[in-house]
Amino acid sequence: RKEVEQDPGPFNVPEGATVAFNCTYSNSASQSFFWYRQDCRKEPKLLMSVYSSGNEDGRFTAQLNRASQYISLLIRDSKLSDSATYLCVVNMAGTYKYIFGTGTRLKVLA
Amino acid sequence: DTGVSQDPRHKITKRGQNVTFRCDPISEHNRLYWYRQTLGQGPEFLTYFQNEAQLEKSRLLSDRFSAERPKGSFSTLEIQRTEQGDSAMYLCASSLQLAGLGHTGELFFGEGSRLTVL
Protein backbone atom coordinates (compact mmCIF):
# COMPACT_ATOMS: atom_id res chain seq x y z
CA ARG A 1 0.00 0.00 0.00
CA LYS A 2 1.26 3.46 -0.90
CA GLU A 3 1.96 5.84 1.95
CA VAL A 4 -0.18 8.55 0.37
CA GLU A 5 -2.93 7.73 -2.12
CA GLN A 6 -4.97 9.96 -4.37
CA ASP A 7 -7.40 9.43 -7.21
CA PRO A 8 -5.38 10.58 -10.25
CA GLY A 9 -8.51 11.80 -12.07
CA PRO A 10 -8.81 13.67 -14.32
CA PHE A 11 -11.72 15.59 -12.88
CA ASN A 12 -13.36 17.64 -15.64
CA VAL A 13 -15.74 20.21 -14.19
CA PRO A 14 -17.51 23.28 -15.59
CA GLU A 15 -16.62 26.77 -14.44
CA GLY A 16 -18.40 27.65 -11.23
CA ALA A 17 -18.68 24.06 -10.05
CA THR A 18 -17.64 22.79 -6.65
CA VAL A 19 -15.17 19.94 -6.67
CA ALA A 20 -13.64 17.89 -3.87
CA PHE A 21 -10.56 15.71 -3.72
CA ASN A 22 -9.66 13.18 -1.07
CA CYS A 23 -6.32 11.76 -0.09
CA THR A 24 -5.62 8.88 2.28
CA TYR A 25 -2.43 8.19 4.19
CA SER A 26 -1.24 4.97 5.72
CA ASN A 27 0.91 6.07 8.66
CA SER A 28 -1.31 6.95 11.61
CA ALA A 29 1.61 8.81 13.21
CA SER A 30 1.75 11.33 10.36
CA GLN A 31 1.62 14.79 11.82
CA SER A 32 1.54 17.49 9.15
CA PHE A 33 -0.50 17.69 6.00
CA PHE A 34 -0.49 19.96 2.98
CA TRP A 35 -1.93 20.51 -0.45
CA TYR A 36 0.42 21.58 -3.22
CA ARG A 37 -0.53 22.68 -6.69
CA GLN A 38 1.47 21.79 -9.78
CA ASP A 39 0.81 23.37 -13.14
CA CYS A 40 1.75 21.49 -16.29
CA ARG A 41 5.54 21.36 -16.70
CA LYS A 42 6.05 23.52 -13.64
CA GLU A 43 7.30 22.91 -10.14
CA PRO A 44 4.93 22.19 -7.22
CA LYS A 45 3.93 25.14 -5.05
CA LEU A 46 2.27 25.18 -1.65
CA LEU A 47 -1.47 25.78 -1.86
CA MET A 48 -2.33 25.42 1.80
CA SER A 49 -1.52 23.59 4.98
CA VAL A 50 -4.19 21.38 6.52
CA TYR A 51 -4.96 21.89 10.19
CA SER A 52 -6.80 19.57 12.54
CA SER A 53 -9.68 21.98 12.89
CA GLY A 54 -9.95 22.46 9.15
CA ASN A 55 -9.09 25.68 7.42
CA GLU A 56 -10.28 27.87 4.61
CA ASP A 57 -8.49 30.18 2.22
CA GLY A 58 -10.88 31.99 -0.07
CA ARG A 59 -12.55 29.41 -2.30
CA PHE A 60 -10.41 26.58 -0.92
CA THR A 61 -11.24 24.52 2.16
CA ALA A 62 -9.07 21.78 3.60
CA GLN A 63 -10.16 19.19 6.14
CA LEU A 64 -8.32 16.53 8.11
CA ASN A 65 -9.90 13.34 9.44
CA ARG A 66 -7.33 11.60 11.62
CA ALA A 67 -9.63 8.74 12.59
CA SER A 68 -10.10 7.71 8.97
CA GLN A 69 -6.67 8.94 7.91
CA TYR A 70 -7.70 11.16 5.07
CA ILE A 71 -7.52 14.78 4.09
CA SER A 72 -9.72 16.60 1.65
CA LEU A 73 -9.62 19.71 -0.49
CA LEU A 74 -12.79 21.48 -1.58
CA ILE A 75 -12.73 24.08 -4.32
CA ARG A 76 -15.81 26.25 -4.70
CA ASP A 77 -16.77 28.35 -7.72
CA SER A 78 -14.08 26.76 -9.90
CA LYS A 79 -12.13 29.04 -12.23
CA LEU A 80 -10.36 28.14 -15.45
CA SER A 81 -7.14 29.07 -13.68
CA ASP A 82 -7.72 26.31 -11.12
CA SER A 83 -6.84 23.73 -13.78
CA ALA A 84 -3.76 21.97 -12.42
CA THR A 85 -2.64 18.87 -10.54
CA TYR A 86 -3.28 18.92 -6.81
CA LEU A 87 -0.75 17.03 -4.74
CA CYS A 88 -1.47 15.72 -1.26
CA VAL A 89 1.62 15.87 0.98
CA VAL A 90 2.18 14.21 4.33
CA ASN A 91 4.99 14.78 6.78
CA MET A 92 6.08 11.56 8.42
CA ALA A 93 6.26 11.77 12.19
CA GLY A 94 9.76 12.06 13.60
CA THR A 95 11.31 13.14 10.32
CA TYR A 96 11.29 16.10 8.00
CA LYS A 97 10.54 13.85 5.05
CA TYR A 98 7.57 14.96 2.98
CA ILE A 99 5.72 12.27 1.05
CA PHE A 100 3.74 13.27 -2.01
CA GLY A 101 0.75 11.52 -3.48
CA THR A 102 0.48 10.93 -7.20
CA GLY A 103 -1.66 14.02 -7.59
CA THR A 104 -5.21 14.60 -8.78
CA ARG A 105 -5.57 16.33 -12.10
CA LEU A 106 -8.29 18.96 -12.37
CA LYS A 107 -9.51 20.53 -15.60
CA VAL A 108 -12.03 23.34 -15.37
CA LEU A 109 -13.99 23.74 -18.58
CA ALA A 110 -15.44 26.97 -19.98
CA ASP B 1 16.15 35.85 -8.88
CA THR B 2 16.21 34.68 -5.26
CA GLY B 3 14.42 31.37 -5.76
CA VAL B 4 15.81 27.84 -5.96
CA SER B 5 17.89 27.35 -9.07
CA GLN B 6 18.89 24.09 -10.70
CA ASP B 7 21.43 23.34 -13.36
CA PRO B 8 21.36 21.99 -15.99
CA ARG B 9 17.70 22.28 -16.88
CA HIS B 10 17.98 19.46 -19.39
CA LYS B 11 20.48 16.66 -19.74
CA ILE B 12 20.54 13.94 -22.39
CA THR B 13 23.04 11.17 -21.83
CA LYS B 14 23.82 7.68 -22.97
CA ARG B 15 23.28 4.69 -20.76
CA GLY B 16 26.30 4.04 -18.57
CA GLN B 17 27.44 7.65 -18.34
CA ASN B 18 27.63 9.65 -15.12
CA VAL B 19 25.62 12.82 -14.64
CA THR B 20 25.66 15.52 -11.97
CA PHE B 21 22.97 18.03 -11.11
CA ARG B 22 23.43 21.15 -9.04
CA CYS B 23 20.95 22.92 -6.82
CA ASP B 24 21.31 26.37 -5.30
CA PRO B 25 18.67 26.82 -2.59
CA ILE B 26 17.21 30.03 -1.27
CA SER B 27 20.13 31.54 0.60
CA GLU B 28 18.85 31.49 4.17
CA HIS B 29 17.24 28.05 3.91
CA ASN B 30 18.90 25.38 6.02
CA ARG B 31 17.05 22.34 4.65
CA LEU B 32 17.47 21.00 1.16
CA TYR B 33 15.58 18.15 -0.50
CA TRP B 34 15.95 16.12 -3.65
CA TYR B 35 12.94 14.53 -5.32
CA ARG B 36 12.44 12.63 -8.55
CA GLN B 37 9.29 12.91 -10.63
CA THR B 38 8.13 10.88 -13.61
CA LEU B 39 5.16 11.56 -15.84
CA GLY B 40 1.84 11.12 -14.10
CA GLN B 41 3.42 10.61 -10.69
CA GLY B 42 3.99 12.84 -7.72
CA PRO B 43 7.49 13.80 -6.59
CA GLU B 44 9.29 10.83 -5.03
CA PHE B 45 11.50 11.58 -2.04
CA LEU B 46 15.21 10.85 -2.55
CA THR B 47 17.11 12.56 0.26
CA TYR B 48 17.36 15.66 2.41
CA PHE B 49 19.97 17.75 4.21
CA GLN B 50 19.96 19.88 7.32
CA ASN B 51 22.78 22.29 6.57
CA GLU B 52 25.62 20.03 5.38
CA ALA B 53 24.35 16.85 7.10
CA GLN B 54 22.48 14.30 5.01
CA LEU B 55 19.79 13.21 7.47
CA GLU B 56 17.80 10.74 5.44
CA LYS B 57 18.10 8.84 2.20
CA SER B 58 15.35 6.89 0.50
CA ARG B 59 15.67 3.12 0.46
CA LEU B 60 14.71 3.36 -3.20
CA LEU B 61 17.95 5.15 -3.90
CA SER B 62 20.54 2.75 -5.21
CA ASP B 63 24.26 3.03 -4.58
CA ARG B 64 24.57 4.68 -7.97
CA PHE B 65 23.05 7.84 -6.51
CA SER B 66 24.97 10.17 -4.23
CA ALA B 67 24.20 13.63 -2.97
CA GLU B 68 26.33 16.17 -1.19
CA ARG B 69 25.95 19.58 0.37
CA PRO B 70 29.52 20.27 1.39
CA LYS B 71 29.22 23.76 2.83
CA GLY B 72 25.58 23.73 3.70
CA SER B 73 24.73 25.88 0.71
CA PHE B 74 24.48 24.39 -2.78
CA SER B 75 24.00 20.67 -3.31
CA THR B 76 24.92 18.19 -6.02
CA LEU B 77 23.19 14.97 -7.01
CA GLU B 78 25.31 12.52 -8.96
CA ILE B 79 24.03 9.46 -10.79
CA GLN B 80 26.67 6.97 -11.84
CA ARG B 81 26.29 4.44 -14.65
CA THR B 82 22.93 5.84 -15.68
CA GLU B 83 20.14 3.50 -16.74
CA GLN B 84 17.09 4.23 -18.87
CA GLY B 85 14.94 3.94 -15.75
CA ASP B 86 16.73 6.97 -14.33
CA SER B 87 15.02 9.20 -16.91
CA ALA B 88 12.94 11.64 -14.89
CA MET B 89 12.68 15.19 -13.64
CA TYR B 90 14.97 15.75 -10.65
CA LEU B 91 13.54 18.40 -8.37
CA CYS B 92 15.36 20.25 -5.64
CA ALA B 93 13.51 22.05 -2.87
CA SER B 94 14.61 24.10 0.11
CA SER B 95 12.93 25.18 3.30
CA LEU B 96 13.68 27.06 6.46
CA GLN B 97 13.53 25.51 9.90
CA LEU B 98 12.89 28.16 12.50
CA ALA B 99 14.39 27.27 15.87
CA GLY B 100 11.72 26.64 18.45
CA LEU B 101 8.89 27.02 15.98
CA GLY B 102 9.12 23.70 14.20
CA HIS B 103 8.91 23.42 10.47
CA THR B 104 6.68 25.60 8.32
CA GLY B 105 6.26 22.77 5.87
CA GLU B 106 6.62 24.97 2.85
CA LEU B 107 9.01 23.53 0.35
CA PHE B 108 10.21 25.92 -2.34
CA PHE B 109 11.01 23.97 -5.48
CA GLY B 110 13.33 24.74 -8.32
CA GLU B 111 12.20 24.24 -11.91
CA GLY B 112 13.95 20.88 -12.03
CA SER B 113 16.59 19.14 -14.09
CA ARG B 114 15.16 16.84 -16.73
CA LEU B 115 17.27 13.76 -17.41
CA THR B 116 16.87 11.62 -20.50
CA VAL B 117 18.94 8.45 -20.69
CA LEU B 118 19.18 6.96 -24.18
Image (cartoon, rainbow, N blue to C red):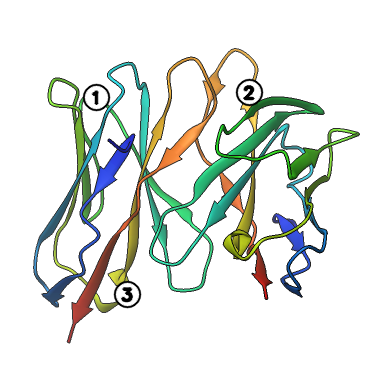
* Residue A49 higher or lower than A96, as above or below: below
**Residue reaching furthest to the bottom:** A110
Label 3, on which residue? Answer: A81
- Position in image of residue B69 (x %, y %): 83, 37
**Numbered disc 3: secondary structure:** helix
- How crowded is the residue under tag 1: few (<14 C-alpha within 10 Å), some, or many (20+)? some
- For residue A95, side relative to residue B72 (left or right): left
**Quadrant location of the C terminus of chain A in the rendered image:** bottom left
Label 1, on which residue? Answer: A52
- For residue B59, side relative to residue B116 (left or right): left
Q: Which amino acid, mark 1? A: Ser
- Position in image of residue B98 (x %, y %): 63, 23
Q: CA distance from mark 1 to mark 3?
A: 28 Å
**Numbered disc 1: secondary structure:** loop
- Position in image of residue A26 (x %, y %): 27, 28
Asked if one can make out residue A72 in the rendered structure from this viewpoint, the answer is yes
Asked if one can make out residue B1 in the rendered structure from this viewpoint, the answer is no
Q: Which amino acid, mark 2? A: Leu
- For residue A87, side relative to residue B98 (left or right): left
Residue occupying the point 27% across, 35% down: A1
Q: Residue B60: which numbered mark, if any?
A: none
Q: Quadrant of residue A53?
A: top left
Q: Quadrant of residue A93?
A: top left
Q: Quadrant of residue A63?
A: top left
* Residue A106 higher or lower than A86, as above or below: below
Q: CA distance from mark 1 to mark 2?
A: 21 Å
Q: Which amino acid, mark 3? A: Ser
- Position in image of residue A70 (x %, y %): 19, 34
Front one among B50 and A61: B50
Front one among A19 and A94: A94
Q: Residue B98: which numbered mark, if any?
A: 2
**Residue reaching furthest to the right:** B71
